[in-house]
Structures are given as C-alpha cells and as structure tokens.
Image (cartoon, grey):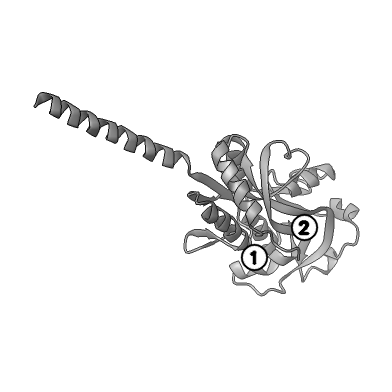
Amino acid sequence: MHCCLISFFTRYLVLGILSFSANCLAENESLQVVTELSPPYQTITKNQVSGSATQLVKDILSAAEIPASFDMYPWARAYAKALNEPNTLIYSMAKTTQRSELFHWLFPVAHYKFGLVAMSARADLKIKNLNQLSNFVLAVQRDDIAHHWAIEQGLEEGKHLIICSDIGCSWQLLLKNKVDFIVESPELIDSMLAKYSLPTNLAEYVIAIPELELTGYLAANKNIDTKLLRKLKLTIKNKDLSPKKK
C-alpha cells in the first residue's frame, strides 16, 4: 500500500515538475517587440500597437507561432531595450554602419525618404540647399538617425537643434511655430496631421535629405534565443512580406 502511494505521489510530482518546466519554457519562448510612434507604419489603435509595419511583424510572428508582446516607446528607450534585453525585437530601424553588427537584421518593413518638413504658411522656409539649415531651428528625436545626421552637419543643440523624446514632440513644436523644421518622410505627413485632426495642407515636405533615404527593418537583439531566431528566419524565408517602395 505504502509503495503504491509512494509510486503515485512520485508520478504526480514528476508530472508536476514537467508541467512547470513546460510552462517556464513557453514563457521563455515569448518575445518582446518594441517600436516608436510613426503613423501609418506604427501607431496606436484602441490602446493596441498597430499600423502597416506592425501588421507585417505580427504576420511573421503568427506564422512562426511565436507569442509576443508589443510596446511603443520614445525611440531612445525602444532602442536601448532592443540593444540590451535578450529576446527583444525592434522595428522600423535603419541599418546603419554603426548598428549593423549590433543586431540580427530580419526583414524590411518600411521605406523612408526623410527630409525637412515645415509649416506651409512659412514662405521664408522654401530653402533649396541643406547648407542653409544653420540659419534655422530644427527639431529631431533623441538618438535617432536624424539626430546623428544633424550633429554631423554641425548644428548645435540649444541653438539650431531642439531634441525631442519622440516624433509627437517634434510635431507639436512645429505646429506651435517653436521650430522651423522637423525631419519626416513625405508619406507620414498626412497621418501625423490627421492624428491631431488638422488639415493635410497645413505642413509640407520642403527638401529631401539624401543620406536619410533608407529602409526600416525588423531587427533582433544579438542574444535572442537561437531556436526562436531559427524559427523567425525560416518563416521569413518562406514568406514574401516585404513592403514595396513608395
């Protein structure tokens, strides 16, 4: 009798341990996905991260059967999490020389042609040469590619350059005429103005920044679980979810 009880409880204990281990494994196999506000590619709908680029990422994760949480942060925070926290994905991120070895680059989700955007009523801002930018004030997001580009152009923070936490902050400064220009891609202008219930002709794309025409990627932290990375790469290989250039 005692032997039977011991055997029963032993089996029960083993099954419990296996179940606990399986649950832990399932939890470890989930991913954290981070991004920034950039409608229509990345936006918030009914308190959920959405948008066309978001849908591409969700399609890949669904096809790979990998659970994931999506969160939106200011760019600097999203980038720091993706750089430092294992099993974290980030999008839409430019593959610069400085970043190329820091992440696993999975697939493109958007294409941008960033340039200077100004209020349409400002006739004095119809500049034809980027060398003229030192005569004006520009808002950029902290630690993004436009921020680094502006520094390379010699623009001084506090004098020619205002640093924002996210694109919403930059747009607010532009709409309130606190800055002359922001950096934005032309296909994003209408979506941002619509976000503030403003007419789409209120702001306009003034001049392109050739160095900032780029592709935004889904990328993964270097320490992502190798099994998850393999599943993602295999799913991506078997699907054509890349966006077409505009």
Three-letter amino acid code of the residue under disc 1: Met
Q: Residue 172 placed where, x, y %?
A: 64, 60
Give the CA separation, mark 2 to mark 1: 14 Å
Dot 2 lies on which element? strand
Is residue 214 toward the left or the right of residue 230 in the image?
right
Q: Which residue is mark 1?
A: 192
* Closer mark to the observer between disc 2 and disc 1: 2
Decide which of tag 2 and tag 1 comes sooner along the chain: 2
Q: Name, please, the residue furthest toward the left.
A: 1
**Is 146 left, or right, of 131 in this rendering?**
left
- Quadrant in which the C terminus appears: bottom right
* Crowdedness near tag 1: few (<14), some (14–19) or many (≥20) residues, C-alpha within 10 Å: many
Q: Residues within 10 Å of mark 2 (few under 14, many from 20)?
A: many
Residue drawn at 19 percent across, 28 percent down? 7
Pinpoint residue 80: horizontal percent, then vertical percent. Answer: 61, 39
Point 78% across, 65% down: residue: 205
Estimate the x, y position of residue 105 in percent, counting from the top left: 68, 44
Q: Residue at x 24, y 32 (%)?
A: 11
Total numbered labels placed on residues in the image: 2
The image quarter in which residue 86 lies: top right
Q: Position of residue 245 (x, y in %)?
A: 76, 63
Residues 60 and 70: in front is 60
Q: Is residue 180 visible?
A: no
Quarter of the picture containing the N terminus is: top left
Secondary structure at badge 1 equals: helix
Query: 71 or 207: nearer the eye?
Result: 71
| Residue drawn 91% across the image and 58% down it | 129
Q: Is residue 173 visible in this depiction of the protein?
A: yes
Say which residue label 2 marks.
Answer: 114
Q: Amino acid at mark 2?
A: Phe
